[in-house]
Amino acid sequence: MSNVLVIIVTGLLCALVGGGASLLIYVQKLKRAKLTAADVIENAQKESNNIRREIKLEAKDEAIKIRDRAENEAREILKEVRNMEKKLEKRELYLDRKMEVADKRAEELELKEKKLNDYNGELEEKKVEIEVIKEQQLEKLEKIAGLSSEEAQDRLKEELLEDTRMKVAEAARDIKEKAMREANKEAQKIIVSAIQRSAADHTAESTVSVVNLPSDNMKGRIIGREGRNIRHFESLTGIELIVDDTPEAVVLSGFDPVRREIARVTLEGLIKDGRIHPSRIEAMFEKAKKEVEESIMRAAEEAIDEVSLPPLNKNMMKILGKLKYRQSYGQNVLKHSIEVAWLAGLMASELGLDGTLAKRAGLLHDIGKAIDRNVTGTHASLGADIARRFKEKDIIINAIASHHEEVEMESPIAVLVQAADQISGSRQGARGDTLENYIQRLEKLEGIAESFEGVSKSYAIQAGREVRVLVENDKIDDAGADVIADQVAQKIQQDLTFPGQIKVVVLREHRSVSYAK
């Protein structure tokens, strides 16, 4: 029993001791917690104070910035207001001056109107006085002359009309002669100036091209076995290849100069390569086509650069470049077109017209000659169609279409292009001509002149640029000589085609013969 009590007491004591210790630990923790809470509160207060100070500082800075911006805006607005006030003041001054000037002009107008009214009144009075004086003078004249006023007026009118008619005729003749002199002088000056500033070389080219061979053995290789190479070459190029007895040379014959040039480049490439057979001919032909096309484009670009014009449409440049291989009366058409462009542009500049437009029309005036021969129509109409298709200006289209007078000329540019074309074609050395053609042309000129009644003899001189016509004195008078000159000129225009112009001179010789015995 005592042991149980001891155990119980011991347990109670242990429980008391443990509870006290726990209580003591709890009390200590509570103290530490209070201390920590006090520190946290103190730190929080410090941080809140710091944050409050920072917010106040930021608010002050923002307020200062807002105030500065407001002050700047206010200053700008004030500045604008002052500027507006100054402008308004200037305008007010300007309007005041205008009003003063207007008032002065109004006063001057009133004075002038008043003077005009006074002058009109005086003028009416003078008119009345003049009418009275005229009536008095007429009465005196009728008494002196014994004629009525109507009869005197009719006689005076007749005399005045006759005198005026003679003076007008003399003045018209003088004006016409002076105008002709001035026009000829000015035209000569313009044309000479234009020709002196333009020059172009012209080379003649026939319908054949000669290709030199390194040896006569090459002819057999060109012909090929049983002629297969030459047949394939001709069918591919459309050009006839003539292999004859000419040493170390063959001839390419064809009317299309572009095809002939492609054939020439093809044959020269085959000769240089040494391999001549159908497949190689086709390869060289394609290569030659590209080279000639590049040459055509290069020629067009050089022509445009030479006359200082802006680039044309690419397809139109291809057509223009083909003129490099076209000839007209032995004259290279592209060089002729360049020369016409320069002449037309220079003459247009001398006359105060659009020189660039005239040069463009001159360069394109013969572009119809580049069209293949299987297309019907004159080169002027074909060229106008090309220009119309590529949307050239109406002035250029008309200049192209009318440069051989197939249609009516609608602008001075068209006239200048035609004149430049004739100058370029007719100048010395521009076009080649055979002796036979030259003689035939002179004979035709003389035959036309001698076909008229009253003509005794005619002579073509100055290389066919002038025809001297001798008429019979007893059959043709001076007026008839003028008529024959016009008729011969018209007949030449109808029956012959020629560059430039032909002068017709009719001579009527009168001889008086007497004998002294």
Image: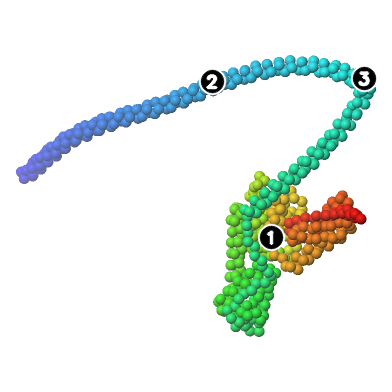
Which of marks 2 and 1 precedes in the sequence? 2
Tell me if residue 392 can be seen. Answer: no
In the picture provided, is 432 more to the left or to the right than 77? right
Q: Element under label 2?
A: helix
Q: Report the mark closest to the observer, 1 or 2.
A: 1
Comparing 517 with 269, the one in front is: 517
Residue for point 69% across, 50% down: 188
The residue identified by callout 3 is 143
Task: Name the amino acid, label 3.
Answer: Lys
Query: As shown in the figure, which amino acid type bears the numbered disc 2?
Result: Leu
Q: Earlier in the sequence, mark 3 or mark 2?
A: 2
- Label placed on residue 93: 2
- Of residues 8 and 158, which is closer to you in this image? 158
Q: Is residue 180 left or right of residue 20?
A: right
Q: With 141 as the anchor, is 393 left or right in this view? A: left
- The N terminus lies in quadrant: top left
What residue did someone put label 1 on?
428
Q: Residues within 10 Å of mark 2 (few under 14, many from 20)?
A: few
Circle nearer the N terminus (1, 3)? 3
Which numbered dot is residue 30? none
